[in-house]
Image (tube, rainbow, N blue to C red):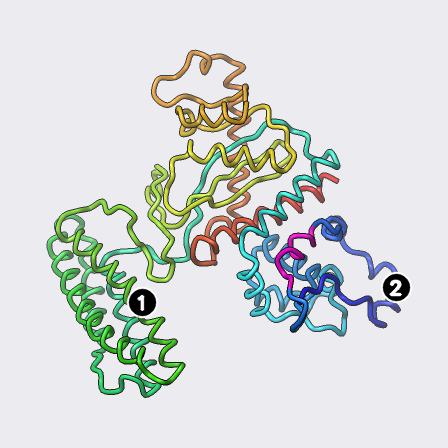
């Protein structure tokens, strides 16, 4: 059941002197922004139950989410800091004798609301900035960047070893319930670990050790395949058990088996000589993460999600993860312009780098009737790119690189939430916190 506002002040706050009741300038302005009813409307459309246990106050949740992404904190650390801080308690509308929400409650609520809520909140904030004439710029700078998934750097041998470990642990939990007690499941983690360490020692020899690495990888894959066969028998027997706990674990084991079989299929292709595998899986725990090549000399390949980022001269941003994988940049331009217009912006000029200078990018500009653009062409440069005025405008576009660097320091570098909806929620929360900070600064 939805609860929008926190209770009024307690007796403790009523007797405090006025100077202790005032918030710092930034928090005071953000508090005034979030106090508007327009930021509660998206929650009303989603939390429609009229019975049951009430939620935490939504105005408290919004302020806690702002502090989390503003200072790049985890929910557990944030709740401890709010408990110990008088100022943060006042900002989050939590009484001195009140209880700070449990971190697990905040996590579950964030997962339940999903990324669409954050998109609506960001659109409402940008619309408010346009209404208050804080956002006046008609120029939109657009670029893409990689948001790393919270996974280790993947290798075929490492993924197979990880599959063996996860299947062995989950199978042991199922056998502990009494289901499939007679089924055999050998723990091969020690054998696989020795071969993984041998591969690590061989990597320093470079290409000379490729044959030996492939041989050890094949041995690890064969042990993983044996573990999959034994775990499949356990999953079938546990699925027929009368124990509810065993059936739940059996369903989880089926999902793990599906992921392990996909990893083994990829490993077989790679051992056969196929180095490029389309839609390659890079993690057992994050099924949507993909390898992404952005052309950076320092890190040519990263693993995660591609995010599109647009900003204005005032520093307000539109950041999101549109899809998994590595779509071409020019395919992402139309969606960015559409989101800016939906928020009330009047976009007259778009600035982007060379990856957007294609026919697809031109079609996006024509679709949204953008007549002015500063986008260099792929291949042979257009004559206008040599003029002094064009180069001066393109230097303004370079400022977006600094904005992306600023967002990465606030947490955009790596998402701590798994799956595509998790990455979208993470990026949306960072964009909302950044925009709130900017609007508060500009007002």
* Mark 1 secondary-structure assignment: helix
Is residue 168 found inside the magenta-colored segment of the image? Answer: no
Frontmost residue, 31 versus 367: 367
Frontmost residue, 207 versus 83: 83
* Mark 2 secondary-structure assignment: loop
Magenta stretch, main secondary structure class: helix
Q: Mark 2 vs mark 1: give the one in front.
A: 1
Frontmost residue, 257 versus 214: 257
Where is residue 254? Give x, y as percent.
Answer: 31, 69
Q: Which residue in the structure is indicated by mark 1?
A: 256
Q: Earlier in the sequence, mark 2 or mark 1?
A: 2
Q: Specify the quadrant that holds the N terminus.
A: bottom right
Splitting the image into 4 quarters, where does residue 65 fall?
bottom right
At x 45%, y 16%, the residue is 385
Frontmost residue, 292 versus 263: 263
Q: Which residues are magenta?
A: 39-48
Is residue 47 found inside the magenta-colored segment of the image? Answer: yes
The label on residue 293 is none
Q: Which residue in the structure is indicated by mark 2?
A: 17
At x 14%, y 52%, the residue is 210
* Mark 1 neighbour density, 10 Å: few (under 14) some (14–19) many (20 or more): many
Where is 389 relative to 26, above or below? above
Q: Does the CB distance between marks 2 and 1 fall below 8 Å?
A: no
């Amino acid at each position: 059941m939805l609860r929008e506002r926190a209770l009024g002040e307690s007796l403790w706050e009523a007797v405090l002197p006025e100077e202790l009741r005032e918030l710092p300038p930034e928090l005071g302005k953000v508090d005034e922004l979030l106090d508007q009813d327009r930021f509660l409307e998206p929650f009303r459309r989603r939390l429609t139950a009229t019975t049951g246990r009430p939620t935490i106050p939504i105005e408290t949740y919004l302020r806690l989410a702002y502090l989390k992404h503003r200072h790049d904190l985890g929910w557990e650390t944030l709740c401890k800091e709010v408990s110990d801080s008088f100022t943060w308690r006042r900002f989050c509308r939590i009484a001195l004798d009140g209880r700070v929400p449990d971190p697990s409650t905040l996590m579950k609520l964030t997962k339940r609301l999903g990324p669409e809520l954050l998109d609506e909140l960001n659109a409402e904030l940008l619309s408010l900035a346009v209404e208050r004439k804080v956002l006046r710029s008609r120029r939109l700078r657009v670029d893409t960047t990689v948001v790393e998934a919270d996974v280790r750097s993947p290798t075929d041998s490492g993924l197979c070893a990880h599959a063996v470990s996860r299947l062995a642990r989950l199978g042991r939990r199922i056998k502990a319930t009494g289901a499939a007690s007679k089924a055999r499941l050998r723990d091969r983690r020690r054998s696989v670990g020795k071969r993984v360490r041998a591969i690590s020692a061989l990597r320093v020899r470079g290409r000379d050790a490729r044959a030996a690495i492939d041989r050890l990888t094949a041995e690890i894959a064969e042990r993983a395949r044996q573990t999959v066969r034994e775990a499949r028998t356990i999953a079938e027997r546990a699925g027929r058990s009368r124990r509810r706990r065993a059936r739940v674990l059996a369903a989880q084991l089926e999902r793990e088996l599906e992921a392990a079989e996909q990893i083994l299929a990829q490993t077989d292709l790679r051992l056969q000589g196929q180095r490029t595998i389309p839609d390659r899986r890079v993690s057992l725990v994050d099924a949507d993460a993909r390898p992404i090549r952005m052309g950076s000399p320092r890190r040519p390949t990263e693993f995660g999600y591609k995010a599109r980022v647009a900003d204005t001269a005032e520093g307000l941003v539109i950041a999101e993860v549109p899809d998994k994988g590595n779509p071409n940049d020019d395919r992402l331009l139309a969606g960015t312009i559409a989101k800016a217009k939906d928020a009330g912006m009047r976009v007259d000029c778009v600035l982007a780098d060379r990856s957007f200078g294609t026919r697809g990018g031109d079609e996006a500009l024509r679709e949204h009737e953008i007549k002015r653009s500063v986008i260099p062409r792929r291949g042979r440069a257009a004559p206008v790119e040599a003029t002094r005025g064009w180069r001066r405008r393109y230097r303004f576009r370079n400022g977006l690189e600094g904005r992306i660097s600023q967002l990465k320091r606030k947490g955009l570098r790596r998402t701590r939430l798994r799956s595509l909806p998790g990455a979208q929620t993470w990026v949306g929360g960072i964009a909302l916190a950044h925009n709130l900070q900017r609007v508060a600064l500009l007002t």
